[in-house]
Image: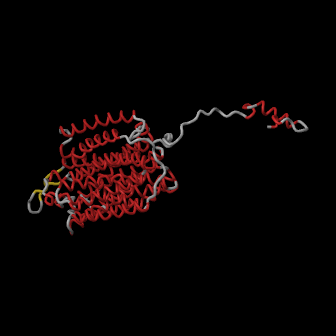
């Protein structure tokens, strides 16, 4: 459990630690500022593609080898970035690092197969909280390394951490026995990868290119056509990459929808908070903090997510994962209500962000439990991978929506020297909080509609049901033998051999 939790923390830390480096990358690599955004976008794309593919492969060939593959790609990508001095090589490394996004869903599925049922809830809650821990730790640690050391030191630190977790995982994780039979759907994998790349590229670049631009519309339309054809293909093959019929059941579809909405609501918290506290003081609300100080403001949120892991597990055990998800999304919406009420004072910003983190911890820990109770054991990794993919899509959409909202509410502010400084208004941040809170309420509605006791899905490993007729009374099944036996017992002496038999 400790090794898998460390893997989840390192994975999220690697994904978020590059954010403080973005403003300096044009100078450090000689690349155009517009191209530097691919350092984040490419990691998002490869992670979204790798998560469902490695999840399905984990169900077929074992979670342990797929976990080692994801951790190995994470370590290899960090090493490439540590040696990179130009943007192309940095993008190669970041693409490899994106494969590590499959670590958390694979770990959750692995734990379901090796732990007793009474420990599954607390373990899943802890693994889900690693997402918040890594996000909270990544920003301040990376900012410290970038500010006081060479920028390659950050990637060397990632290399050592990911390599250490890989070595421990190879040494300590044992093989699990549950496997899903069949051949890997290569055509389905290619179709899903292409559709996701076009869709996420359109979402992640919509704020920069414009929602009505021909590139965004063209990419979105292409993604829709590819994913429609992919869905038809998945319904026809005997061993699909994603069981579409199972995924369309309310017990599975609604948690996936709630995951996408919760991912949107969660990402707005960390995305907007860092920008808000770094806004210049001339705006009237900004605190003018440095990147390191802004990252420290997010540390309480990460600590709270760890503390809420055990609480979430106990709540799910007592009231059910549905109640935990509903409560978590309501708390997220309440946290954004606090952010709207007061975002001028540092303590109010930290408290509001912490409340959102409490709700996120509850929601994220309940989602895998809802998925695992509705799918057979040998499809756990694929289903959890798809659930994490839906969260990724929600985060990509949140990034584009928040960027658009803040861009529309940006105006110049005059500093003490009379120089104009462009920054979003406080009303723009409030609109972003209101959108995130409304999305959290939609996630709450989806959680309320999740069936309490879903019909169990048929297992691929089970034998087909036999045609068993209703059991009849013994006398009705073989009355002649019973009569002969009774008559033999009634005789005073031993009867014929055939009758006593």
**Residue lying at the far front of the rendered structure:** 497
Name the foreground residue: 19 vs 98: 98
Name the foreground residue: 77 vs 225: 77
- Determine if residue 454 is in view: no
Question: Looking at the image, is 67 positioned above or below residue 479?
Answer: below
- Left or right, 318 with respect to 24, comes to right
**Residue lying at the far right of the rendered structure:** 492
Could you tell me residue 217's position as x and y percent?
Answer: 21, 37
Residue visible at 33% across and 57% down in the picture: 72
Question: Looking at the image, is 452 positioned above or below residue 19?
Answer: above
Could you tell me residue 116's position as x and y percent?
Answer: 52, 55
Quadrant for residue 354, please give it: bottom left
Name the foreground residue: 471 vs 417: 471
Could you tell me residue 322's position as x and y percent?
Answer: 46, 47
| Quadrant into which the N terminus falls | bottom left
- Determine if residue 17 is in view: yes
Residue visible at 20% across and 59% down in the picture: 84
- Left or right, 498 with respect to 222, comes to right
Could you tell me residue 332's position as x and y percent?
Answer: 36, 52
- Left or right, 135 with respect to 146, comes to right
Quadrant for residue 227, please give it: top left
**Residue lying at the far bottom of the rendered structure:** 148
Residue visible at 42% across and 53% down in the picture: 108
| Quadrant into which the C terminus falls | top right
Residue visible at 27% across and 64% down in the picture: 140
């Amino acid at each position: 459990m400790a090794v898998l939790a460390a893997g989840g923390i390192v994975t999220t830390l690697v994904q978020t630690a590059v954010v403080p480096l973005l403003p300096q990358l044009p100078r450090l690599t000689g690349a155009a500022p517009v191209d530097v955004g691919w350092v984040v976008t490419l990691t998002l794309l490869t992670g979204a593609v790798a998560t469902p593919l490695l999840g399905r492969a984990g169900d077929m060939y074992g979670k342990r080898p797929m976990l080692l593959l994801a951790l190995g790609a994470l370590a290899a990508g960090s090493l490439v970035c540590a040696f990179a001095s130009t943007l192309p090589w940095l993008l190669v490394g970041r693409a490899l690092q994106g494969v590590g996004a499959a670590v958390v869903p694979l770990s959750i599925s692995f734990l379901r197969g090796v732990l007793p049922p009474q420990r599954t809830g607390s373990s899943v809650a802890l693994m889900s909280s690693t997402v918040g821990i890594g996000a909270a730790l990544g920003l301040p640690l990376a900012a410290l390394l970038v500010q006081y050391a060479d920028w390659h030191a950050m990637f060397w630190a990632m290399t050592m951490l990911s390599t250490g977790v890989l070595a421990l995982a190879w040494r300590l994780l044992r093989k699990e026995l549950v496997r899903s039979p069949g051949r890997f759907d290569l055509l389905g994998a290619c179709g899903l990868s292409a559709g996701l790349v076009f869709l996420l590229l359109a979402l992640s670049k919509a704020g920069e290119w414009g929602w009505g631009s021909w590139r965004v519309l063209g990419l979105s339309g292409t993604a829709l056509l590819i994913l429609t054809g992919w869905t038809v293909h998945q319904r026809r093959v005997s061993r699909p990459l994603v069981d579409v019929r199972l995924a369309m059941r309310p017990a599975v579809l609604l948690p996936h929808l709630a995951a996408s909405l919760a991912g949107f609501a969660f990402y707005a918290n960390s995305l907007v908070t860092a920008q808000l506290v770094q806004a210049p003081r001339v705006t009237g609300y900004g605190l003018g903090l440095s990147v390191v100080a802004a990252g420290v403001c997010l540390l309480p949120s990460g600590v709270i997510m760890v503390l809420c892991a055990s609480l979430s597990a106990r709540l799910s055990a007592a009231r059910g994962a549905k109640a935990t998800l509903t409560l978590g999304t309501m708390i997220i919406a309440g946290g954004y209500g606090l952010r709207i009420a007061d975002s001028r004072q540092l303590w109010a910003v930290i408290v509001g962000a912490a409340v959102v983190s409490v709700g996120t911890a509850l929601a994220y820990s309940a989602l895998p439990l809802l998925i695992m109770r509705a799918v057979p054991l040998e499809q756990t990794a694929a289903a959890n991978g798809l659930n994490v993919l839906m969260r990724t899509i929600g985060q990509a959409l949140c990034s584009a929506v928040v960027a658009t909202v803040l861009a529309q509410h940006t105006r110049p502010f005059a500093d003490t020297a009379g120089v104009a400084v462009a920054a979003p208004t406080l009303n723009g941040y409030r609109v972003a909080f209101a959108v995130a809170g409304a999305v959290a309420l939609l996630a709450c509605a989806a959680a309320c509609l999740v069936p309490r006791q879903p019909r169990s899905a048929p297992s691929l490993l089970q034998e087909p049901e036999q045609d068993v007729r209703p059991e009849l009374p013994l006398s009705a099944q073989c009355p002649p033998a019973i009569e002969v036996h009774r008559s033999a017992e009634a005789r005073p002496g031993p009867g014929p051999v055939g009758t006593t038999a």
